[in-house]
């Protein structure tokens, strides 16, 4: 089957009240040495960035009444933090602005390679996709591959049953998560009025993505 294996992590909940000033930060790790002459030597330690996210929830409804519009967003978010013991456990996060690709090119095939890493290109920068949200679709020259002709592991590595012919383009469409953890061990939930709270400083930091040795 065209299956994939994903670790059993929880998905960060989608809640109303998320402010527009929430942020995303890609960060590399580099070292810069400046000589007395002013010339610099630079070393980059990461091929791909580590992403961090800062979310601000302007309101969290904690209405525990009996009507059909009952919402317990406060309990949902606080419960999620509690279950993950602050920063100690990983979970999946769906970036609302960066979570899907369509007809993303993976590689131009060479006729012998049958293992490939899923990737996504954003603003001209291509990096691996390790955390899939649901089963992706794979294509060879735009033709959908049948289930049973490939498998995908938990790091987004594709194993084809037969290497495509040289010159064929392998691509994919699908959705993905970011694997993250909370940056801090605790967060403030502030009551605004009866039944409404805010949490203005939820911070998450991701794992560095990587490629399997193909």
Image: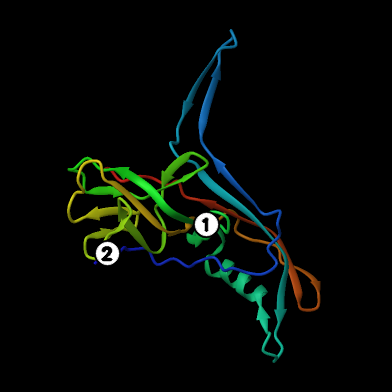
Q: Which mark is residue 30?
A: none
Q: Quadrant of residue 127?
A: top left
Q: Which residue is mark 2?
A: 2
Front residue (pair 28, 186): 28
Tag count in the figure?
A: 2
SS of the residue under disc 1:
strand
Q: Image height check: is 198 above or below 210?
A: below
| Residue 56 is at least partly visible in this image | yes
Residue 67 vs residue 214: left or right?
A: right
The structure residue drawn at horizontal position 67% and vertical position 73%, both measured from the top left corner, is 74
Q: How far apart, in angstroms, are the residues tagged by discs 2 and 1?
A: 29 Å
Give the farthest residue toward the right. Answer: 193
Q: Image height check: is 82 above or below 181?
A: below
Residue 112 vs residue 169: left or right?
A: left
Q: Which residue is mark 1?
A: 181
Front residue (pair 61, 94): 94
Which badge, 2 or 1, is on the more N-terminal residue? 2
Give the farthest residue toward the front. Answer: 142
Residue 157 location in percent, x, y? Answer: 31, 52
Residue 103 location in percent, x, y? Answer: 40, 53
Q: Judge the density around disc 1: few (<14), some (14-19), many (≥20) Cα neighbours within 10 Å.
A: many
Front residue (pair 210, 163): 163
Residue 205 location in percent, x, y? Answer: 54, 51
């Amino acid at each position: 089957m065209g299956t994939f294996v994903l670790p059993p992590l929880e998905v960060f909940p989608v809640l109303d009240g998320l402010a527009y000033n929430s942020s995303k930060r890609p960060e590399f790790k580099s070292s810069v040495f400046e000589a007395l002459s002013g010339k610099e030597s630079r070393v980059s330690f990461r091929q791909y960035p580590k992403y961090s996210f800062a979310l601000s929830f302007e309101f969290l409804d904690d209405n525990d009444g009996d009507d059909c519009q009952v919402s317990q967003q406060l309990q949902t978010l606080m419960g999620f933090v509690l279950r993950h013991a602050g920063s100690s456990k990983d979970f999946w996060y769906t970036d609302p602005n960066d979570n899907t690709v369509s007809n993303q090119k993976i590689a131009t095939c060479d006729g012998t390679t049958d293992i490939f890493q899923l990737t996504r290109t954003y603003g001209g920068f291509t990096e691996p996709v390790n955390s899939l949200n649901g089963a992706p679709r794979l294509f060879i020259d735009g033709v959908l591959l049948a289930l049973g002709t490939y498998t995908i592991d938990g790091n987004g590595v594709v194993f084809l049953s037969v290497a495509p012919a040289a010159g064929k383009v392998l691509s994919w469409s699908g959705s993905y998560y970011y694997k993250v953890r909370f940056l801090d061990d605790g967060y403030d939930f502030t009551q605004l009025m009866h039944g409404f709270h805010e949490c203005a400083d939820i911070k998450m930091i991701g794992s560095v993505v990587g490629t399997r040795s193909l």
